[in-house]
Image (cartoon, coloured by chain):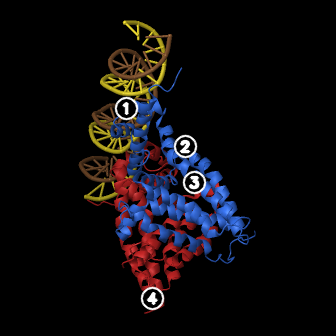
Chain colours: A red, B blue, C brown, D yellow
Amino acid sequence: MDVRRTSLTAHETRNRILDAAQALFVAHGFEATSMRMITGDAGVNLAAVNYHFGSKDVLVREVLKRHLQPLNAQRMQALDAAEAEAGDQPVKPHRIVDAFFSSSLDLASGSAAGREFMQLLGRTFTEPSPTVREYLATEYAPVIGRYRDAFCRALPTVPVEEILWRLHFMLGAMSYAVSGIDSLQVLTGVRIDEPDAMQRMRPRLMSFLLGGLRAPLPAGQGTDNTT
Amino acid sequence: MDVRRTSLTAHETRNRILDAAQALFVAHGFEATSMRMITGDAGVNLAAVNYHFGSKDVLVREVLKRHLQPLNAQRMQALDAAEAEAGDQPVKPHRIVDAFFSSSLDLASGSAAGREFMQLLGRTFTEPSPTVREYLATEYAPVIGRYRDAFCRALPTVPVEEILWRLHFMLGAMSYAVSGIDSLQVLTGVRIDEPDAMQRMRPRLMSFLLGGLRAPLPAGQGTDNTT
DNA sequence: CTAGAATTTAAACGAACGTTTGAATGAAGG
DNA sequence: CCTTCATTCAAACGTTCGTTTAAATTCTAG
């Protein structure tokens, strides 16, 4: 009845599968990565994924959850800290942006696995798989809600719809910057593999995001700015 | 020897395959879309794809090429026109941004098929398939080159590396805004299916992009700004 | 030491994949 | 009319997919 008997090696097998799967998902995508590729790279038996995770779909979710859950928790904490520091004043916009995106960039520039995961995460946002989309939505919903509210307090004169659009644009710029770095290579010759690529991108991305956030609102030209 | 005998219906078969394939690629991705799904939706025989295109890989390229080639041609023309209008003066940055992104947004807001294609294109940038990446690179290289030069002339004080980063960020914000609109739905409740969603997004995106482009350069903090 | 659960293993499962084949179909030219 | 050639069609090709099975192995607890 004691479940924790051989769990040490079991956890090791699980982690080896998760590591191999993450690397292969980045390199080939979810669909194009087969169980045999994963178990082969992980050095475990083909049946191990189904034994430890149940199915490939669950494995995909677990690969994402492993790093996304801590990441979003850190995003919450960073906003907590910024709000505590600001007292009863609204947090300044650039602090909110910093809280959200620094958490991501910390993960991306911390380790090779973190960079790998952020690359995967950026791709996953445009993943059509219903399972993946559903998981991402539930995982992100509370975080986005908190940040939306913080932005609304920080920019009380800006309609909430405008704030959501800009949050969306900022998310896109970052996701693409991290995950679509291969296309950047075509344009600039900068490779993400260079260990300091993330560090060099970071201040540039932050400046760009804040510039976009602070841009003048478009004049009410034809669009229904009823709110 | 006369090749144009039954070619009229042949072209029709080709187009029906391309249309069905594009819709399915958007809904399920390249890998998850099978030949049987495509030919079934198109109402043609299973062997038709291999007969008319040779392989699934070629079909994917043809689906992209059909709209991307005209799109990039229009981007070139738009920059030509802006440069002609500016005479020997450098084109203003906001005109360059407008030339590039208006072409995309025109396509996205023109027809349902155009919107569908732009959604597919945004996803394709993060597609790991080597065949697709290679095609995108060759298709985009001359366009990016022209726009990079235009930006360099318009912003002579800004280092080319900074310009490329910002171009990359802008591309990401737009790609994500168009293709990842499903995640926007989670955040805002705005659905891309609404016919005027693109029109409502357009001024907001343009304002955001220009704000990011004009943002102050990050101070040389720790990064090697040797150039 | 031994009973028993947890894990690993090799082998096989049916289903779906992209592609190929050879005959049937249809329209145009001599 | 008959040949010709492009196209369509149903059927099958071999391969790979995710998953399952049952025996072998490893580990722990009593």
- Tell which tag, 3 or 1, sits nearer the viewer: 3
Q: Quadrant of residue A126?
A: bottom left
Tell me, yes or no, whether the two marked residues, 3 and 4, touch with CB atoms within 8 Å: no
Q: Mark 3 lies on which chain?
A: B
- Tell which tag, 3 or 2, sits nearer the viewer: 3
Instruction: State the residue position of label 1.
Output: B46
- Tell which tag, 1 or 4, sits nearer the viewer: 1
Q: Where is residue C16 in the image (x, y as percent from the top left)?
A: 34, 38
Instruction: State the residue position of label 3.
Output: B74
Labels 3 and 2 in the same subunit: yes
Disc 4 element: loop
Instruction: State the residue position of label 2.
Output: B131
Labels 3 and 4 in the same subunit: no
Instruction: State the residue position of label 4.
Output: A90
**Amino acid type for the residue under numbered disc 1:** Leu
Disc 1 element: loop
- Tell which tag, 3 or 4, sits nearer the viewer: 3
Q: How crowded is mark 1: few (under 14 residues within 10 Å), some or many (20 or more)?
A: some
